[in-house]
């Protein structure tokens, strides 16, 4: 089968989701517990004692300090989210390690494109939903504990949006926003390829490969000493603003990375179509 049938795809997606529902519930519980314990650590273990703050400082100062504590939980949540997305990308076909599961998945009566899209949705997009939901629930549990113990009520989700996401995306030049999303999707595409290529220890081998290639590229660039400034800027004293200037090579590099992102996803799909029941011990070829 080489065509993409929407009805067949939706039924297969529902079937695969129901098969893996216990895994999703278990991951959701683990993620929630980890982030909830981290929230308690940053708000109750590290930093000053809350009772001392209330006794010695005015309420406005206590709120400012506690906002900083909650900000630490947000930073942890963002780091956890990034690693969760990389793990999800590298474990795209982790359910095909043994021969029985591999045979069942490859002989599924759907096209290769449908199988690949189902794996992407359940391993990447659904993992994103689980991670975000776990963070929101952990934040709500932390707020509930604060309310029960008589502390100030400060939610982390509004701070995450107003002070992190909105400022990072909307308060920068569009070129920096482009560079940020290009870098994020480029790294993610590398883990997608690694998760498809490697049969075992996908995250470890992909990370090691990226680290080795990155070190070699840095050593090569240090030898070449390229005299190129991707971004330069000047401070305007009249308007008190920092004006950035982007070198043409900045646009060339970003465009090249965008092309590589598409190529990596295409290569991942082509590697998947070459998978067999009996493959190499370490590689899915």
Image (tube, grey):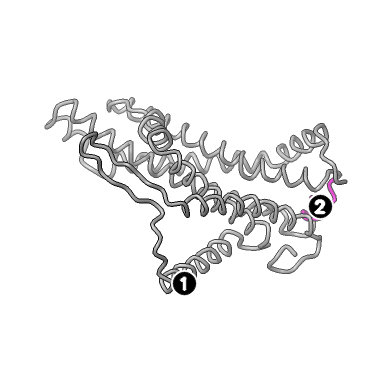
Q: Residue at x 69, y 53 (%)?
A: 93
In this picture, residue 45 sits left or right of residue 91: left
Q: Residue furthest bottom?
A: 223
Which dot marks residue 220? 1
Q: Residue at x 47, y 72 (%)?
A: 220
Of the residues under marks 1 and 2, which one precedes in the sequence? 2
Visible residue check, residue 142: no
Q: Position of residue 277 (x, y in %)?
A: 81, 60
Majority SS type along the magenta span: helix
Q: Residue furthest left?
A: 56
- State the SS at label 2: helix
Up/down of 31 relative to 56, above or below: below
Residue that badge 2 annotates: 106
Q: Position of residue 207 (x, y in %)?
A: 53, 61
**Mark 2 surroundings: few (<14), some (14-19) or many (≥20) residues within 10 A:** some
Q: Between residues 181 and 106, which one lies in front from this camera angle?
A: 181
Q: Between residues 165 and 205, which one lies in front from this camera angle?
A: 165
Q: Position of residue 23 (x, y in %)?
A: 64, 43
The residues colored magenta run 101-108
Q: Position of residue 39 (x, y in %)?
A: 37, 39
Visible residue check, residue 255: yes
């Amino acid at each position: 089968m080489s065509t993409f049938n929407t009805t067949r795809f939706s039924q297969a997606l529902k079937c695969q989701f129901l098969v893996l529902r216990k895994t999703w519930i278990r991951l959701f519980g683990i993620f929630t517990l980890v982030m909830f314990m981290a929230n308690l650590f940053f708000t109750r273990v590290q930093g000053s004692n809350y009772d001392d703050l209330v006794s010695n400082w005015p309420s406005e100062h206590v709120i400012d300090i506690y906002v900083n504590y909650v900000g630490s939980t947000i930073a942890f949540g963002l780091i956890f989210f990034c690693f969760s997305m990389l793990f999800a990308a590298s474990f795209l076909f982790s359910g095909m390690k043994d021969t029985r599961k591999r045979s069942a998945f490859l002989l599924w009566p759907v096209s290769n494109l449908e199988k690949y899209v189902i794996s992407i949705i359940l391993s990447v997009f659904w993992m994103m939903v689980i991670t975000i939901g776990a963070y929101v629930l952990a934040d709500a549990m932390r707020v509930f504990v604060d309310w029960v113990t008589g502390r100030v009520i400060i939610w982390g989700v509004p701070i995450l949006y107003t002070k992190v996401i909105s400022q990072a995306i909307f308060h920068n030049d569009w070129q920096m926003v482009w560079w940020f999303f290009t870098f994020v999707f480029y790294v993610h595409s590398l883990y997608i390829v690694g998760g498809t290529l490697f049969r075992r220890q996908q995250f470890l081998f992909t990370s090691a490969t990226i680290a080795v290639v990155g070190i070699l590229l840095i050593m090569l660039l240090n030898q070449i000493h390229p005299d190129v400034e991707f971004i330069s800027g000047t401070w305007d004293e009249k308007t008190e603003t920092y004006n950035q200037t982007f070198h043409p090579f900045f646009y060339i590099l970003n465009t090249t990375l965008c092309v590589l992102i598409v190529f990596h996803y295409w290569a991942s799909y082509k590697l998947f179509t070459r998978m067999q029941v009996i493959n190499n011990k370490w590689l899915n070829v």
